[in-house]
Amino acid sequence: MEAVESFGTIISRTPLRLPLGGGGTDLPAYYEKYGGFFISGAISKYVNIVVHRQIGKGLKLTYAKTEIVNNASEVEHPLIREALKKTNINQGIELLSFSDVPASTGLGSSGSYTVGLLRGLHAVRREFLPPAELAEEACDISMNILKEPSGKQDEYVASYGGIRAYTIDKSGKVESEELKLSQSTIADLESNVMLFYTGMTRNSGDVLSKQQKNIRSGSSVEQMHRIKQIGIESRTALESGDLRRFGELLHEHWMEKRKVTDNMTNDIIDRYVAVARENGAIGEKILGAGGGGFLMVYADNNHKKIRLAMEKLNLVEHRVRFDFEGSKVVYNI
């Protein structure tokens, strides 16, 4: 449309995600042959998108840079351009965004950004998409239109929120189911999961491209099969409240994941993992594609000891709480 509907300011809030098992099986190179399964939790770290009505024609878009253009086709930022096209908004808005964590750190910020952007732009059109439809629209942009080497985890977790299991069939259809967790299990998870920012960012596309290449060639298929099985076992452990077993499976997951590609880890990351385990960690892994970003540590005690040891390595801890609302509009006037 040439002009937007009557509105003032809309703000969407979309959670980032914490993968809890089976990550990587959401990549098409794997699920198209074998089907995927993963569990993941949305956390109370957010990407916020502000959409403001702009008097007159044109678009003003502010992210790491500012674009002032005449219409959607002139937009340089690929996700914004395609989201505007998908929602048929061509001009008349100002858009800006801010996030609780840096990009390229393993918490799914790109997927959350796309989901939150679409949530806000659909609100401009007075439309509400249910979580599955919103997630698929975001996946279509990243995987089909922009041909990024990504999977479906980030967009689905950002859309749904909560702690859920996701099953992907060979056609790419995703089924989502909330995990049956007691309140005490959720509270213990929030207490026992420790996130440390390594200060290293990386291009997840490079890691994911190599991972999918290795899956297609067959060189890492056995590792991916085991990762999927660990995800299934992790679900059982979480729903039964056996969090120590969950921590052990987290470690097993990391041992398999680091074999998938040679750029999954490095000497610095291996040192961080070793120090965490020396000081009482049960499980650990680098989040997201690997190669940097956040280190997730699970420990049912020794938290202070681990925290002090990681501080000596100049790692900053970020506390975790889970989000059970998913992507939503928090302001619309």
Image (spheres, helix red, strand yellow):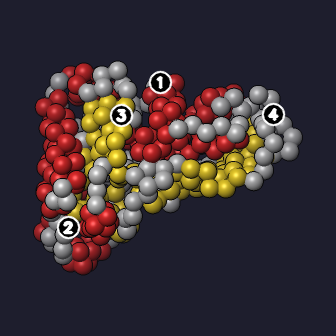
Residue found at x 37% / y 68%: 319
Distance between the Cα atoms at labels 2 and 1?
A: 39 Å
Q: Quadrant of residue 188?
A: bottom left
Mark 3 — residue? 175
Give the SS element for disc 3.
strand
Q: Earlier in the sequence, mark 4 or mark 1?
A: 4
Q: Earlier in the sequence, mark 3 or mark 4?
A: 4
Q: Quadrant of residue 217?
A: top left
As drawn, the label of residue 3 is: 4
Residue found at x 65% / y 37%: 127
Q: Judge depth for marks 3 and 1 and give the one in front.
A: 3
Distance between the Cα atoms at labels 2 and 3?
A: 31 Å
Q: Earlier in the sequence, mark 2 or mark 3?
A: 3
Q: Quadrant of residue 93?
A: top right
- Report the side of 83 relative to 73 (left or right): left
* Image quadrant occupied by the N terminus: top right
Examine the rendered structure and indicate whether residue 55 appears above or below residue 138.
below
Residue found at x 53% / y 41%: 115
Q: Earlier in the sequence, mark 4 or mark 2?
A: 4
Mark 1 — residue? 144
- Report the side of 270 relative to 329 (left or right): left
Q: Judge depth for marks 4 and 1 and give the one in front.
A: 4
| Amino acid type shown at disc 4 | Ala
As drawn, the label of residue 299 is: 2
Q: Judge depth for marks 2 and 1 and give the one in front.
A: 2
